[in-house]
Image (cartoon, rainbow, N blue to C red):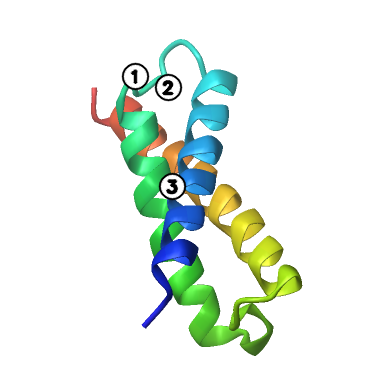
């Protein structure tokens, strides 16, 4: 079970990644407030998956914590892009 501080960091990094991806995808692919939600979900779920696959993502030290924050931002942005593409294709 992850530490509460780690989950908050993943949440913030995922939100930042989701909103950054939303800014880059303005127009048809914009989810509006959904950028924040999908970024948060992608950040938390992505890091949890990566922690089970890669042992260097475990722990609460500077190295693993920075890697987790980066992974949360990337996974949050990735899920935002996927959700926006699915939403656009459904129209």
Q: Spatial distance from mark 1 to mark 3, Cα to Cα?
A: 14 Å
Q: CA distance from mark 3 to mark 2?
A: 13 Å
Single out the residue that lies furthest toward the right: 63
Q: Earlier in the sequence, mark 1 or mark 3?
A: 1
Query: In the rendered image of this protein, does residue 54 appear above or below residue 41?
Result: below
- Residue matched to label 3: 79
Q: Nearer the viewer, mark 1 or mark 2?
A: 1
**For this view, does 76 lie left or right of residue 61?**
left
Q: Residues within 10 Å of mark 3 (few under 14, many from 20)?
A: many
Classify 45 as above or below 17: below
Disc assigned to residue 32: 1
The answer to which of 7 and 54 lies nearer the viewer is 7
The quadrant where residue 80 appears:
top left
Q: Secondary structure at mark 3?
A: helix
Give the Cα distance between marks 1 and 2. Answer: 9 Å
**Marks 1 and 2 in Cβ contact (< 8 Å):** no
Q: Disc 2 marks which residue?
A: 29
Residue 78 visible here: no
Q: Position of residue 69 (x, y in %)?
A: 61, 57
Residue 48 rendering spot, x and y as whole percentages:
44, 73
């Amino acid at each position: 079970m992850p530490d509460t501080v780690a989950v908050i960091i993943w949440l913030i990094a995922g939100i930042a990644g989701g909103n950054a991806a939303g800014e880059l995808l303005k127009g048809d692919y914009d989810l509006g407030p959904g950028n924040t939600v999908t970024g948060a979900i992608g950040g938390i779920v992505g890091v949890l998956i990566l922690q089970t696959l890669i042992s260097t993502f475990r722990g609460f030290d500077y190295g693993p914590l920075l890697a987790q924050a980066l992974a949360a931002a990337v996974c949050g942005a990735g899920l935002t892009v996927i959700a926006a593409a699915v939403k656009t294709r459904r129209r």
